[in-house]
Amino acid sequence: MKAYTGEQIRTVGLTGHGDTGKTSLVTAFLYTAGLIDRLGRVAEGQSVTDFDEEEIERGVSIWSALAHAEWPSSAKASEGKASPEKVKINFIDTPGYNLFINDTKSALVAADSALILVDSVSGPEVVTEKVWDYAVEYDLPRVFVVNKMDRENASYERTLAALQERFGRAAVPVALPLGEEKNFRGLVDLIGMKAWSYEPDGNGRATVADIPGELAEAAQKAHEALVEMVAEGDDKLMEEFFEKGTLPEEDLRQGLRGAVLARRVHPVVPACALHNIGSDYLLNFVVDFLPNALERGQTIGFSQPNRQGEEIVRQVSDSEMVAVFVWKTLADPYAGRISYFKVQSGVLKNDATLLNYTRETNERLQHTSVAQGKQHTQVAELHAGDIGVVSKLKETLTGDTLGDKGAPIHYPPIKLPTPLISSAVEPKTRQDEEKMSAAMHKILEEDPSLQYGREEQTREFLLSGSGQQHIEIVVSKLKKRYGVEVTLKAPKVPYRETIRARAEAEGRHKKQTGGRGQFGVARIKMEPLERGAGFEFVDDIFGGAIPRNFIPSVEKGIVKSAARGYLAGFPVVDFRAILYDGQYHDVDSSDIAFQIAGSLAFKKAMEQAKPALLEPVMNVEVYAPQEFSGDLMGDLSARRGRIQGMDTRGSMTVIKGQAPMSEMLDFATSLTSITQGRGSYHMEFAHYDFVPYEIEQKIIAQRKRGEEAEEEEA
């Protein structure tokens, strides 16, 4: 494939709610452009960009994927200047389901514009709002594609009204549908004022003719609204509009392009990707009205990782030093680690050696390629603004920046939300246990939204993700890709125990079995400490009641017993043990004797010290539309939560509070149900607090039943 320069490149992220037809549209684009020889169907596992076995099996996009097409450019694009004969369009096909939306956010950092697909029946949905927010965050020009116009009950007018209500009057149609539902056959172009008709399931190329008489009036009215919207933000065009009452087509095209690039207008286009209706119109629109790679202007990085150090402004230009940003990693079991990157500046030559600024290691980029789904085609070079893939980089991971040694720059990695759901992961066999760590490490490389680690207190391996299906996909991948079988369980809550009162006790260990015996006496006082203080041991021995070398033994015995718990087997914390007296024997006393004495003293003191259970309490921050705030506060209160405040951000409400961890394990499911998937939340540990007595008794009883069951199995 030839190397394209920045002005010849368009990189478009296809986004939208699940089942709006993003993958089908990419397939239609590739078929129309002659890159594939058949119009594959997602449902039949034939699409180019859904190639992962989990995606094929489930029929949905789980990961973002790349494809590209070459398409002729109109000479009217780019302010009337002659454009290259062909343009390279990079397509980033992104997931649309809420569980996998983090991958969409990560992928859009590589895009220069966004097509937001909307179902013609459902209209804008939950994820429509989220991807809109991502596009705003990345400052991307955006176009709405009202897809599936062939569906029963499809309505362009209703969907357009919903878009304008949700995203403002800047959502302006640049085309009207020719028919709807089963009669949908094309569109009316409001720029050139022509009708584009298509053969369903055809080659995606329209027959252009005059607008049918029955649509002429509606088309003229919509054309005038488009002209007025384009002229509104441009003084020169506004003057021409007032003078002539309209704008010539060439001026309208130039004005529309400027308005789209300035994010003043968000065009709306009808289409049917499944039957390849509207594909060439959209390809023309991408080439003529969306920004080329150089029009993004400049990128901002830092002299140190993680947004530290001085800010560095780098032009998206071939004349700058080379810098590439890795925005995605795949762990292929055969090809190894595959890195997806964007050339932020300079020209990347195949087989170049670059410095990984993040990890301070050199990497050789052999077989630099462009991706067509899972197929990779090697290229000699990639110019500023283009996207490529390379395999088998040794140290490089998602979020790393590589480039010339003499011009370091660190582009900040994408900030992803904290995982919402955790499950305990348990290997089925010893062999699975040995392979699990390495397999999980590879999966984490390609999915930064996951978290995996060992909870020290419960001794469980916890896998955390966006939802239950997200975690189940990881489990499926472990088995299919790496041959590791695991089971999922609800995570244990890391309860702790403490004391509420002072106590005093003696631990006496005496054993005589012939020959040398065992003897040790330890007298201790125990008193509660403030939350979070842990354990404190005080040596208050006077007069040699216990030799100095045995005092650490008493402490060790107390620590061991505290770790095993008293009420329900949870560690005892936040107390002070004062060793004030004891007895020893010149012959029979030993380290183990005083460890046992310390342990016995601890257990007797616990009987008097009013032991109690502690539970972890979490700081919770819930982000949701205002209309759900009442239901959410009620739900949190029912979970023994304490609301601490509310903030309003636009149409959204932020509820802040605290709630016990045990009550929040299934909150993600309730939040999705209450807010219809439009809410999100963040949770982090705050402190430990006492468990209410009734709940404490249930936990203790449940723990004892579990221990009895384990003894019976043994």
Image: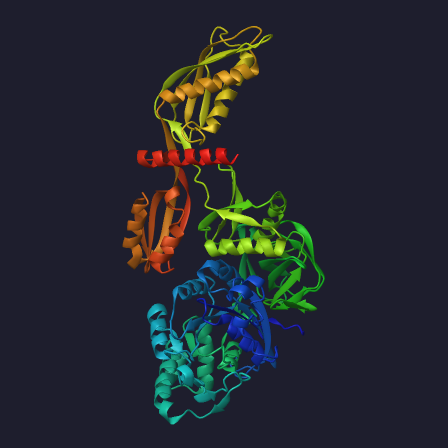
Colouring convention used in this rendered image of the protein = rainbow
Q: Is residue 472 above or below residue 5?
A: above
Q: Is residue 63 left or right of residue 163?
A: right
Between 480 and 333, the one nearer to me in the picture: 480
Q: 508 or 74, which is in the foreground?
A: 508
Residue 586 is situated, as x and y percent measured from the top left of the image, at 56, 5
Q: Residue at x 49, y 64 (%)?
A: 95
* Snapshot quadrant of residue 321: bottom right
Most foreground residue, 668 or 492: 492
Residue at the front extreme, as displayed: 712
* Residue 576 image-quadrant placement: top left
Observer-nearest residue: 309 or 329?
329
Q: Using the image, determine if residue 499 lies above or below residue 20.
A: above
Q: Is residue 463 above or below residue 350?
A: above
Q: What residue is shown at x 49% (from left), y 71% (from top)?
A: 22
From the top left corner, tell me how far across and down residue 632 is, in percent.
31, 52
How far across and how far down the image is residue 268, in percent?
42, 76
Q: Is residue 296 visible?
A: yes
